[in-house]
Image: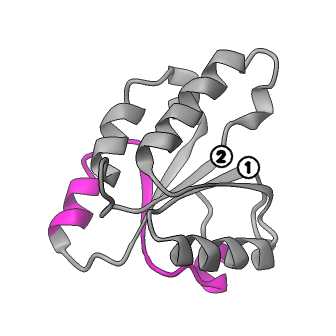
Amino acid sequence: MTTKKYQNVMLIDDNEIDNLINQKMIEAAGITETIFTHSGAKSAIEFLRNIEKIMRKSPNVLPQVIFLDIDMPLMDGFQFLDQFDKLSTETKNYCKIVMLTSSINPQDLNKSKTYEYVRKFLNKPLTQESLKNLDV
C-alpha cells in the first residue's frame, strides 16, 4: 500500500517541541512537500482567512490536512473549529482536520466527533504508522 500524498499540511500546536517532532515525522513519511507550522490557533485561523482572500490566484496554498492540538492557550482546538466553521465552503471541504492531542479525556474524543470537519482523532506524537494509515 502506498502512502497517500497531500498538497500541503498544517500543524497547529502551542508546544514547539511537539511541532518539531511531528514535522520531522511528516517529512520522514514523505506525505507532503509543504508543512505550515503554527504555535497558536489564532495565527492559524488568520492564515486560513488570508489564504481565502488570495485563493483565486493561488488555489493550491490551502492545507489538505490540518493536525490540530486541543489544549492551547488563547484559543484551544475546539475554539479553532468554531472559527473554522465560519470559513468558506470550499475551504471547509478541502481541509481535512485531524485532532492530534495528548488528551486521554474521553469527553475530548466525543466532542471532536460533533464537528463534521474532524476526520480523525490521534494521540501525540505522530508515528510513521499513523501517517501511513492517515487516509483522510
Q: Is residue 86 above or below residue 109?
A: above
Residue 101 picture location, percent across and down: 38, 71
| 42 lies left or right of 51 | left
Q: Is residue 39 above or below residue 126?
A: above
Q: Residue at x 78, y 72 (%)?
A: 27
Tell which residue pokes out farthest to the left in this image.
107
Three-letter code for the amino acid on which mark 2 is drawn: Gln
Three-letter code for the amino acid on which mark 1 is drawn: Asn
Q: Is residue 58 above or below residue 30?
A: above
Pointer 2 local density, CA inside 10 Å: few below 14, some 14–19, many at least 20: many
Q: Earlier in the sequence, mark 1 or mark 2?
A: 1
Q: Which residue is mark 2?
A: 64
Q: Which mark is residue 27?
A: none
Label 1 vs label 2: CA separation? 6 Å
Q: Which residue is mark 1?
A: 8
Q: Quadrant of residue 57?
A: top right
Label 1: state its secondary structure. Answer: strand
